[in-house]
Amino acid sequence: MQVGIKEIKLTDEKMAQFYSDYQLDESLFINQYVIIKDMKDNYIDRYKWDGKKLNKFNNKIIHNKYIDKLKPRNFRQQCCFDLLSNDSIPVKLITGVQGSGKTFLTLHYALDKLENGKIYDKIVYIRNNIDVKDTKELGALPNGLRDKLLPYIMPIADCIGDVLGLQLLENQGKVEYVHLGHVRGRSFSNSIVIVSESQSLTKEHVALLLGRIGENSIIVFEGDLTQIDKNVFKENSGILALEEVLCGNELFGWVHLDKTERSKVANLSSLF
């Protein structure tokens, strides 16, 4: 994936020229990240294109009461931290291989914003598992909607330690999980809207969700195009629609994480 982040190899001569004028003979999108590499494939530096020039950015740190200082583990995660922390880019797309940190980083960033910032009131967590066209029906709800959705919102509990912590945030009104089939008519203001498993969205789903974003809110789509479970999402991909329609829009940014950081065992999945 070279659109959200573009990796560029430079010879020693071109590297010297780049650091004299910070110009590249490349076509770039606004908010596109650029990673500079040498001819031996070593990572050298990273920048973001603002539409006029390349800007170097400082490493960001995520910190909340559930985790100590969380720092990026690789260059692409540095780009991800920068995108997440930038409130002027309200529509964010984070794609990546399993274990690359897309859900973990997004949730901890959101918890950091709730705890240490004053802009956002709550996290709204949405995942397509049901109901609107091309989603699964919930069926009977003997224990209520929350219990039916609980398996799909366990990533939040994993980040904060347990289900009791999740219930506490819910009781405080800081976390709301919404069934995709129930978003029509909703308006999310002063919120961080996280759309998990976005590879299971159609173009129409993406348009529906963007239309729910109110004042002082951002929306983060995160997903993995290698984990598509139904043909409809291959034929009508919401993630690919986001790229096609919004790349170059100042309100949109995208990063792709290509390295598993969960564990050595998790990294073995790439062999299959």
Image: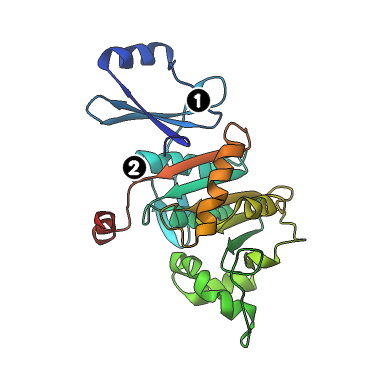
- Residue type at mark 2: give it: Asn
Query: Residue at coordinates 34% horizontally, 46% vertically from top-left?
Result: 73
Sequence-first tag of 1 and 2? 1
Residue with the mark numbered 2: 74
Query: Residue at coordinates 55% horizontally, 40% vertically from top-left?
Result: 243
Q: Position of residue 137 (x, y in %)?
A: 62, 74
Query: Residue at coordinates 57% horizontally, 80% vertically from top-left?
Result: 147
Q: Position of residue 156 (x, y in %)?
A: 50, 66
**Would residue 105 appear left or right of 177 to someone viewing this image?**
left
Vertical placement of 184 versus 217: above or below? below
Quadrant (top left/top right/bottom left/bottom right) for the C terminus:
bottom left
Q: Secondary structure at mark 1?
A: loop
On residue 28, the disc is 1
Q: Are marks 1 and 2 in contact (CB under 8 Å)?
A: no
Vertical placement of 110 versus 52: above or below? below
Q: CA distance from mark 1 to mark 2?
A: 22 Å
**Quick one: label 1, few (<14), some, or many (20+) residues within 10 Å?**
many
The reply to whether residue 218 is visible in this rendering is: yes
**Would residue 190 appear left or right of 37 to someone viewing this image?**
right
Q: Secondary structure at mark 2?
A: loop
Query: Residue at coordinates 54% horizontally, 75% vertically from top-left?
Result: 150
* Colouring scheme, one of rainbow, by chain, secondary structure, one colour: rainbow
- Residue type at mark 1: give it: Leu
| Residue 1, quarter of picture | top left
